[in-house]
Image (tube, rainbow, N blue to C red):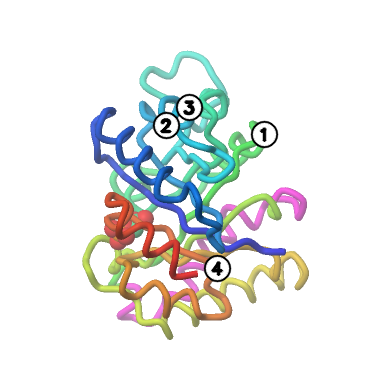
Amino acid sequence: MKKNIVAGNWKMNKTLPEGLALAIELNAALAGAQPNCDVVIGTPFIHLASVAEAIDTNKIGVAAQNCADKESGAYTGEISASMIKSTGAEYVILGHSERREYYGETSEKLNSKVALALANGLTPIYCCGEALEVRNANEQNTYVKNQLEETVFNLSADDFKKIVIAYEPIWAIGTGITASTEQAQEMLAFIRGLIATQFGHEIADETSILYGGSCNAKNAAELFSQPDIDGGLIGGASLNVADFKAIIDAF
Ligand code: PGA
C-alpha cells in the first residue's frame, strides 16, 4: 500500500548544534505518538550522522538533500550515495528545483544520481515542478511530463516502485503562495495517470506522490484530504517543531 509521508527539507539552515536540537525536539514530540504517516527530515549533509544517531530512526527517517552523480573518487567536495547510506540516512531528495536552477542539475545528472541512490539502498524523493511562466502559459502538464519522461520513467518498474515523487511548483516554494488544493490535486492526479500509462495501474496506485510549496500547519489538512495527495515536502515549516508536528498531525 502507498504510504503517507511528511518530509521536511531543512535546506541550508541550522548549524550542527541547532539542527541536532531541532531533531531531538521533534523526536521527543513524536515519542508517544502514532502518526498516520511516515516522517522524514532532510538535513544538511554534515548533520546526517549525528541526527541519525540521536533520534529513533524507526520513527523518523533521515534524508540527504542531494548526492553525487558519481560513485566515488576524485570529485572534491562531493558526497556519494554510499557515504549518505553509511550515516544511517535512508532517503535522498533529488532534483529539487533549487538544485536544478542554481547548480545546473540536468536530467542526465539526475539519472545518475537516482541510479546511485537506488544502488545504495536509499529511497529517492524525486522532485518535479514548473516555473511561474510555464504555469501562466498553461504548459505545466507537458513540462512535468517531460521532466519525468527524461528521468525516472526510464527506470525499470521494480526500481520505480522504490521511489517517492514530490511535485513542487516553483512559484509556490518559499513564497507563501500555496497551489490551491484543486491545482495540487489536479497535477498529482495527472502524474499518477502518467505513472499508470508507463508502469500500470497497480504501481501508480502504490506510488507515494507528495505536494510541496508553502505547505503549512493551516493548509496541510485540506491538501492531505485529496485522493492523490499522499503527503508533503515541507521547507520553511519543517524548521519549527510545533509547525512540523501540526502538519504531521494533519493526517
Ligand atoms: P517551502 O519549501 O515549504 O518553504 O515552500 C518546500 C520545498 O522547497 O521543499
Front: mark 1 or 4: 4
Gap in angstroms between the C-alphas marked 3 and 1: 23 Å
**Along the horizontal axis of the image, is 211 left or right of 22?**
right
Please tell me which of labels 4 and 3 falls first in the chain: 3
Residue 235 drawn in magenta:
no
| Residue beneath disc 3 | 53
Please tell me how crowded label 4 is: few (under 14), some (14-19), or many (20+) other residues with Cα within 10 Å.
Answer: many
Residue 25 image position (x, y, % from top left): 34, 42
Residue at the farthest bottom position: 182
> Quick one: 88 or 197, which is closer to the camera?
88
Q: Is mark 1 within 8 Å of ligand 1?
A: no
Helix, strand or loop at label 2? It is helix
Amino acid beneath label 1: Ala
Dot 3 and dot 2 residues touching (CB under 8 Å): yes
Dot 2 and dot 1 residues touching (CB under 8 Å): no
Which quarter is ligand 1 in?
bottom left
Front: mark 2 or 4: 2
Tell me the tag on residue 230.
4
Tell me the tag on residue 119.
1
Gap in angstroms between the C-alphas marked 1 and 4: 25 Å
Please tell me how crowded label 1 is: few (under 14), some (14-19), or many (20+) other residues with Cα within 10 Å.
Answer: some
| Residue beneath disc 2 | 51
* Location of residue 227 by image quarter: bottom right
Asked if residue 90 is positioned above or below residue 170 in the image, the reply reads: above
Helix, strand or loop at label 4? It is loop
Helix, strand or loop at label 3? It is helix
For the record, the magenta segment spans 134-159
Q: Residue at x 75, y 51 (%)?
A: 156
Residue 249 image position (x, y, % from top left): 44, 65
> Quick one: 182 or 197, which is closer to the camera?
182
